[in-house]
Amino acid sequence: MNLKEVQQQIYQNKVDKHWNISSVETELCLMHGEIAEFYEAYRKHLPSIGEELADVAIYLLGIAEILQIDLEKEIERKMSINRRRQYTQIDGVSTRISE
């Protein structure tokens, strides 16, 4: 699965259905609602947990497309940064000690 293509499909679905494609603030609020639904499904061990998590991802990818951010590239870049960072336990807390 190519995330950039998925982003574009999500955006096109928004266009086709005349949903919001301009207000990131609106999308964040709607995504917050989806996160709450995911949490409830998780907390109650509901079979819809995967669907709710997919809704969260759909909103995230939609926001990335609205902002013209290639989220796949950004994730790869950030994972590379995270792999290089070093951590140690200080007073029971994992603390970054180097980039």
Image (tube, grey):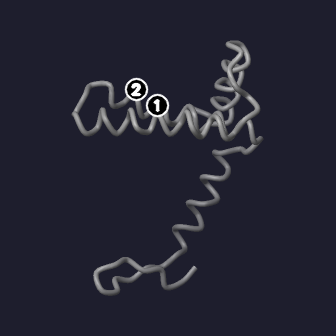
Placement of 63 over or under 17, stated as above or below: below
- Which residue position is annotated with label 1? 54
Position of 20 compared to 37: left or right?
right
- Give the residue at the far top of this rendering: 17
Position of 21 compared to 38: left or right?
right
| Front-most of residues 77 and 39 | 39
- Which residue position is annotated with label 2? 51
| Amino acid bearing label 2 | Glu
Tell me the tag on residue 36: none
- Give the residue at the far left of this rendering: 45
Report if the CB atoms under discs 2 and 1 are less than 8 Å apart: yes
Q: Where is residue 8 in the image (x, y as percent from the top left)?
A: 70, 28
Q: Residue at x 53, y 36 (%)?
A: 31
Position of 94 compared to 57: left or right?
left
| Amino acid bearing label 1 | Ala
Q: How crowded is mark 1: few (under 14 residues within 10 Å), some or many (20 or more)?
A: some
Q: Position of residue 6 (x, y in %)?
A: 63, 29
Q: Tell me the quadrant of the picture where the N terminus can be found.
A: top right
| Front-most of residues 18 and 97 | 18
Q: Which residue is drawn at 34% across and 83% down?
A: 89
Q: Which residue is drawn at 60% across and 60% down?
A: 78
Q: Quadrant of residue 15?
A: top right
Cα separation, mark 2 vs mark 1, equals: 5 Å
